Image (tube, rainbow, N blue to C red):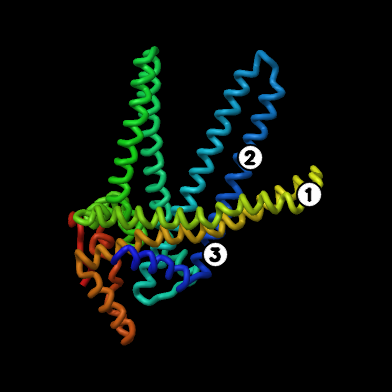
Amino acid sequence: MTLGVILTASLMVLRRNPRPIFGLALIIMGVVTVSSLILVGVVTVTGVDRTLSASGADAATIEAGATVSVVLAALFAVALSLIGGSILQGIVSLEVARGALGEKLRLRGLWNAAKGRLGALIGWSALVSVATFLGFVVIAVVTALLFAIGGPAGIALGIFAIVIGLLLGVALLAGLGTFLALVPSALMIERLPLGRAIRRSWSLVSGSFWRTFGILALILVIVQVVSGVVTAPLSFIGTIAAGLLNPTGNETVAIASFVGLYVLTMIISVAIGAVTIVIQSAAPALLYIDQRMRKEGFDLELTRFVEARQLGDNSVPDPYITLESKNPRSTDPSPSTVS
C-alpha cells in the first residue's frame, strides 16, 4: 500500500462504520480533554491563590508545592490521554481487521472482541511512557551536573548536552517507534503476549523500515497540518466575534463571550481530534495487514476465509489467529497462519 492508499483507507474506517468508531473517539476525546482541563485548571488556580496569599516565610515552600501539584496534575492528564488513546487504538485496529474480511461490527461487538487485550495495550503504552520519561530524566540529570560545574564552560557544556540529548532522543524514539509501531495491532488482532507482540512488530517492519517510517511520519504531519489549518482561524474569528458582541467593553459581556467562545472552540477541537486520532490509529493497523500480505501472502488467507464464509463454510479458521496466538509457548518468532 502507498501513502495515498493508506490515508484513504484510514478515512474509510470512519465512513464505513462511523457510529461506533467516531462516537467512541468523540466520547474518549471529550472525557480526556474536559477532565484534563478541569483537573489542571483547578490545581493551577488553587496553587496560584495559595501562593499569592502566603506569608513571606512560607511563600517559597508553598510556591514549590504548587508547582509540584501542577506538574503532577499535568502528568495525570497525560496518563489519562494515553489510556484513552490506547483503548481507541485497540478498537480501531480490530475494526480495520474485521473490515478487511467484510465484517461490520457494532460497538458492542468490537468491545467484546477487545476483551482481555485492553490491559495489555494500556500496559504497553505505560511502558513506552515510562521509558520516554526516564530518557528525559537522564538528559535533565546530565545537564544539571554540567551546569553545576559553573562558569562559561559549564553553561556551554550544559546547553550542548541538552541539544545532543534531544537530538539523540528524537532519533531513538523515531527508530524504535517505527520498529514497534505494529505492537498494538499484534496485541489486539493476533492476541499475542506483549513480548511476542514486540518481536512480531520488529519482524514485520524489518526490511521496510524507511517505508513504514515515511508513511507514519507523513500521515502524522498531514493530520496535524489539517487540524491546525481548521482550528487556527478559530482564535482569530473568536477575537473579532468578541469585539462585535461587546462593542461597549462591558466586563460581564466580555466574560460571557470568552467562556462561550472557549467552549465552542473546545468542542470543535475535540471533534477534529477525534477524527485525527482515528486516522492515526488506523494507519498502523493497515500497515500491519499490508506487511503480512507482503511477507506471508496474507491476502490469499483473507480471500480464502471470505470466500468460505460466503459459501457457508465455517471450517476455515480466522486468518488473524496464528499458531503463536494459540500456543504462546511456541518458539516460532514469525508464524504463518493456521491452515
**Image height of 260 relative to 307, above or below:** above
In this view, the residue in front, 160 or 127, is 160
Point out the tag, 2 or 3, that comes first from the N-terminus.
3
Which mark's residue is nearer the viewer, 1 or 3? Answer: 1
The Cα atoms of the two marked residues, 2 and 3, are separated by 26 Å
**Whole-percent x and y of residue 288?**
30, 61
Going from the N terminus, do you reach mark 1 or mark 3 first? 3
- Disc 2 designates what residue? 41
- Which secondary structure lies at badge 3? helix
Q: Which residue bears the numbered disc 3?
A: 23
Q: Position of residue 191 (x, y in %)?
A: 33, 59
Of the 4 image quadrants, the one containing the C terminus is bottom left
What residue is drawn where x is 72% and y is 23%? 53
Which is more toward the observer, 20 or 226? 226
Return the mark for residue 96. Answer: none
- Determine the secondary structure under disc 1: loop
Local SS, label 2? helix
Q: Nearer the viewer, residue 80 or 213?
A: 213
Give the image quarter of residue 287: bottom left
